[in-house]
Amino acid sequence: MRYLIILTLSLFCSQISHSQINEIGVFVGGSNLIGDIGATKYISPNAPALGLLYKWNRSTRHSYRISVIYSDLQAYDSDAKDPRRLERDFDFNSSLLEIAAGMEFTFVDFNLHARRTVATPYLFTGISATKFDNYHFANNRQTTENNSSWTVGIPMAIGFKTNVLGNLIFSAEVGARYTFSDNIDGSMPEGSTNQQYQFGNINNNDWYTFTGITLTYTFGVKPCYCYD
């Protein structure tokens, strides 16, 4: 009977050690476009970005993550060093909504219930769906088409996180998004009537980046490490 109880407790604790640990919080930062308009710097946030995110920490080394981020994406040829863009002098301003899901990997164990400060770099990747407004440029001016489109993308981010004030997790992150569209900046409007408005490099799709911080709150079943 004694051995049966020990075995039962062992199996119970083994299950609890993999219990669902949740995080929910906010993202605050900035965005910038990497496309056919504006500066060619990869990390140069010039517009605010706000979002919500949720994580399910499957283990101390990886977690599943979903986020929703909104930004007023902007780009200005006047910020570029390319003389052709400076001479063209286009301005771009559009709203962007991203829904992303994927997996976050930590470089070292990140125990959310450790009774000490823990910190680690991490990587994130997955898949994203991005909604953007459709525009084209006529007479050197951004002209709305009064509709929007969705595109699929691949988010890639690197960050650093640490636990602060008990159940709060703070992180700083830089993330790039490769999209399967070349029209986020209005350079490749679709439709035969819009072909006259196409410009830029037709061989490169648009990218955009999010740079900022997150603050999340942890909750859920606390792990039980009975035989550590």
Image: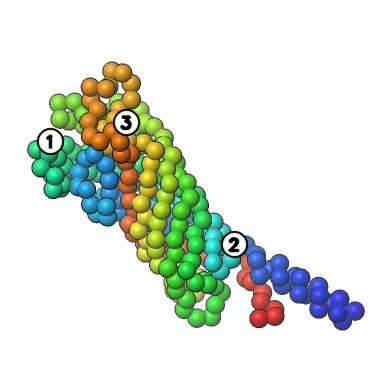
Name the residue located 21 percent from the left edge and 40 percent from the top edge. Answer: 37
Q: Is residue 30 left or right of residue 104?
A: left
**Mark 3, residue position:** 134
**Mark 1, residue position:** 88
Quadrant of the frame with the C terminus:
bottom right
**Mark 2, residue position:** 58
**Which type of secondary structure does the marked residue at label 3 adopt?**
strand
Question: Does label 1 or label 2 sit earlier along the sequence?
Answer: 2
How far apart are the two marked residues, 3 and 1, measured between alpha carbons? 20 Å
User: Type of residue at label 1?
Assistant: Arg
How many other residues sit within 10 Å of disc 2, few (<14), some (14-19) or many (≥20)?
some
Question: Does label 3 or label 1 sit earlier along the sequence?
Answer: 1
Name the residue located 19 percent from the left edge and 26 percent from the top edge. Answer: 138
**Which type of secondary structure does the marked residue at label 1 adopt?**
helix
Picture coordinates of residue 215 (x, y %)?
42, 63
Question: Does label 3 or label 2 sit earlier along the sequence?
Answer: 2
